[in-house]
Image: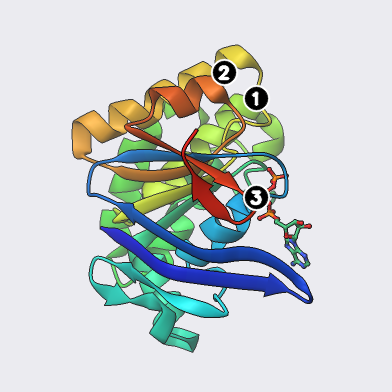
Amino acid sequence: MLQAKGIYKNYGALPVLKGVDLEVKEGEVVSIVGSSGAGKSTLLHIAGTLDAPDKGEVYINNTNVTALSGNKLSAFRNKHIGFIFQFHHLLPEFTAFENVCMPGYISSASKSAVEKRAKELLETMGLAHRLEHKPSQMSGGEQQRVSVARALINNPDIVFADEPTGNLDSHLAEEMHELFFKLRDAIGQTFLIVTHNNHLADLCDRKLVMKDGLFVTE
Ligand SMILES: Nc1ncnc2c1ncn2[C@@H]1O[C@H](COP(=O)(O)OP(=O)(O)OP(=O)(O)O)[C@@H](O)[C@H]1O
């Protein structure tokens, strides 16, 4: 599903990634842990096509995404990749339903199919009663579940999550973690998750530990 080969990234004179290899198989939930500054988010952003490596290649479902740019890259990202961030980045002026539909409207899917799927996803997230609420009218846990529904609207090959529960209390974080594993079991959803939450990391199919820009064995 995902292969990153020999990924290097420097920020100015600072070497952040030093030849990282990573593979995630279909239907796997893989976590990346490690101390602050180890390079976890940098790798997630490169694997998720949000940033380019200085050297190395990323393949998602056999497409060399490192070779894509401009509209082709945007279209690939929209169709094949979902993102969940620590801060949900929902658009404040739009409702939960509209936020979830947005990436679907951008893809070439039909409007009615997008809206049907958005409703179904929000129902699955236990948010059937929140469709018309704006982010400011929802709790932090509800907002984050809307962002999960948004990440899934185009049926992505893989979801990249950067500290997805870092902003939630432990009870809500647990619920969110259960949701990830439920999605893996129900629809074979693949996830790559950067987290400082050891409990979540331990529940994952595999836990990768990053130190100073490389994976290490614990
Ligand atoms: N855009 C940038 N410009 C310059 N330096 C950066 C940039 N992004 C990250 N860095 C630096 O690269 C290093 C790795 O950052 P990264 O965010 O990948 O670490 P991390 O392991 O995700 O840390 P944390 O757990 O604190 O989020 C850090 O030293 C950081 O300061």
Residue 195 occupies quadrant = top right
Task: Please give the label number shown on residue 172.
Answer: 2
Against 22, residue 74 (above or below) is below
Q: Residue furthest top?
A: 171
211 on left or right of 174: right
In the structure shown, which secondary structural element does the residue marked by tag 3 occupy?
loop
Q: Residues within 10 Å of mark 2 (few under 14, many from 20)?
A: some
Q: Amino acid at mark 2?
A: Leu
In the structure shown, which secondary structural element does the residue marked by tag 2 occupy?
helix
Task: Give the residue pinned by disc 3.
Answer: 89
- Residue 109 in the image, given as x and y percentages of width and height: 28, 66
Task: Give the residue pinned by disc 1.
Answer: 168
N-terminal label among 2 and 3: 3
Q: CA distance from mark 3 to mark 1?
A: 15 Å
Q: Amino acid at mark 3?
A: His
Q: Residue furthest right?
A: 13
Between 149 and 39, the one nearer to me in the picture: 39
Residue drawn at (56%, 28%) of the image: 142
- Residue 63 in the image, given as x and y percentages of width and height: 28, 75
Q: CA distance from mark 2 to mark 3?
A: 18 Å
Against 202, residue 16 (above or below) is below
